[in-house]
Amino acid sequence: MIVILSSHAGPANPFVQALTRAGANVTALSEPNDLIDAKPLYDVLVLDQTNESVVQLVPTLRRLSTGQNLAEIPQLLLARSADDPETVIRQSGLELVIYPTPIRANSLVRAVRNLAGS
């Protein structure tokens, strides 16, 4: 089971489509609080921030990564290349697997499978 947190959550999201076609059970949420409140049992959390600034997102990412129910879930950040997400995340001290976008559907599916351990 995969949860995608995206400002453009829903079936039209290309990442949701790619993972669904690959056979994943995908839940797409648009608000971080929905994810925190849900107390999820997901295998992987995908943070689709391709349309958001990673710098502005760091406080939310910190809150998500320290939550009791999310601390053990592998997290994959899809971020705009223009933000230099690797440097921003490294400086923030967060432990996330980062893929600057654009990412091909096959690479996304492979990365999620690797994080899920299957």
Image (spheres, rainbow, N blue to C red):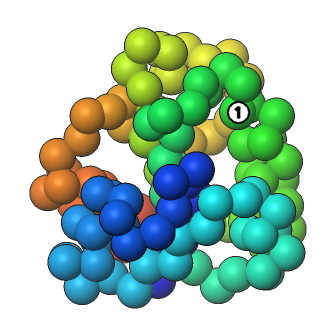
Residue 28 versus residue 72: which sits nearer the camera? Answer: 28
For residue 94, what is the image quadrant? top right
Name the residue rendered at 49%, 22% in the picture: 86
Name the residue rendered at 67%, 20% in the picture: 55
Horizontal and vertical percent position of residue 113: 30, 68
Horizontal and vertical percent position of residue 80: 42, 26
Return the residue at label 1. Answer: 57
37 lies left or right of 91: right
Residue 51 versus residue 81: which sits nearer the camera? Answer: 51
Asked if residue 44 can be seen in this view, the reply is no
Horizontal and vertical percent position of residue 57: 70, 33
Name the residue rendered at 59%, 25% in the picture: 53
Name the residue rendered at 73%, 31% in the picture: 58
Horizontal and vertical percent position of residue 38: 78, 80
110 lies left or right of 66: left
Residue 118 versus residue 108: which sits nearer the camera? Answer: 108
Q: Secondary structure at mark 1?
A: helix
State the quadrant of the C terminus. bottom left
Q: Is residue 78 positioned above or below 45 on the image?
A: above
